[in-house]
Image: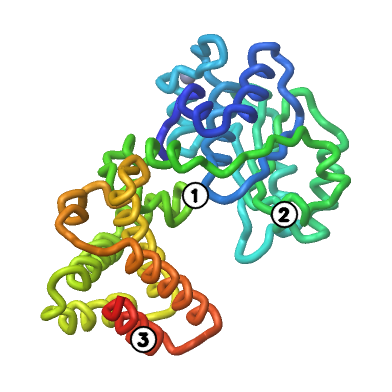
Amino acid sequence: MMTKTWEQLTLMQPIAVKMLTNSILKERISHAYLLEGPKGTGKLETAMQMAKSIFCSELSGFEPCHACSNCRRIESGNHPNIYVLKPDGLSIKKQQIHALQEEFSKTGLESNKKVYIIEHADRMTINAANTLLKFLEEPSSKTTAMLLTENSHQMLNTILSRCQTLTFRPLSKELLIQQLQLQGISHAFAATAAQLTNNIEEAQNFCNDEWFAQARTLVIKLCEVLGKDTSSLFFVQEKWGKHFADKEQLQIGLDMLLLIYKDLLYVQLGENENVTFLDQQSLFESLSYSQKRIVSALSNILEAKNRLNANANVQLVFEQLVLRLQEG
Ligand SMILES: [Zn+2]
């Protein structure tokens, strides 16, 4: 996991981070926190950062040093007083909670402070949840629980009521692009991925996937060929068919196609700040699509997406779409 500072996490989740850093400064850390929000919003990173702030031996304000032995052991996932629990298969079972409690009943050699993090806490079985509840009902001042979930509505109210809830919000596009660029991803790729998902992990996976890079190239190629050189249409069409072979893949391809046609419109309207395919400005200027043709292309692509959703044949949907885009 990449180390983030509280300052970096604040950019992603200002409210949740403010609550946590305040509780560190005021030395009023809760016994139990619920970190709830969609996938890819920084819940686990925040929980690990909180653990660092609790154990760091060189804490400055609320910021851990990221260098002391405690910080380093947390970073590498082997701190003796931190217990991370996740589903074993589909669910978190009672035995797992028992093992956690047993571990926590031992007196630590180094410190009596202990932190446990439960990922996908909503996947606890009823027995597991009831066992955890008893644990939460007898809080020790030395223990901090961090329960992480994407579905807090599936958790027992009795558990929720014992936790301080921190809500993690989906990242804005600007922030997502910024975070991806921090990881060395090009602006043009980051901008494309950020249009397809607001989940940072998914966006990272897109950008690091050769399939995505090729998909992006094919989308650009199709737009170009339809706009100026239909002689190679058959060739591009064939490549598309192979690359976007199933329904999910074609949905992504069509989403990107929508984006590039929108870009054409933005360029014509002089709204270049809205362009997603940032590296294709010269292509956009070389194409002579009328606005009417762009608008009709957008509606045809949307219709193709709907037909795919309604389980129409993947190949057929694409072939018919290309015919319509060609007619303009
Ligand atoms: Zn430290």
Of labels 2 and 1, the one closer to you:
1
Point 43% across, 22% down: residue: 66
Left or right relative to 132: residue 208:
left
Could you tell which of marks 2 and 3 lies nearer the N-terminus?
2
The three-letter code of the residue at mark 1 reads Asn
Residue 150 drawn above or below residue 83: below
Residue 20, quarter of the rendered image: top right
Residue 231 drawn above or below residue 31: below
Depth order, front residue of 164/328 = 328
Left or right relative to 18: residue 201:
left
Where does the image place residue 125, in percent across and percent down from the top left?
A: 77, 60
Q: Which residue is mark 1?
A: 198
| Label 1: how many Cα within 10 Å (few below 14, some 14–19, many 20+) | many
Q: Which residue is mark 2?
A: 122
- SS category of the residue bearing label 1: loop
Point 21% across, 52% down: residue: 280
**Callouts 2 and 1 close, C-beta under 8 Å:** no
- SS category of the residue bearing label 2: helix
Placement of the C terminus among the 4 image quadrants: bottom left
Could you tell which of marks 2 and 1 lies nearer the N-terminus?
2
Q: CA distance from mark 2 to mark 3?
A: 44 Å
Point 64% across, 30% down: residue: 16
- SS category of the residue bearing label 3: helix
Q: Which residue is mark 3?
A: 320
| Label 2: how many Cα within 10 Å (few below 14, some 14–19, many 20+) | many
**Callouts 2 and 3 close, C-beta under 8 Å:** no
Depth order, front residue of 273/287 = 287
Left or right relative to 34: residue 87:
left
Residue 1, quarter of the rendered image: top left
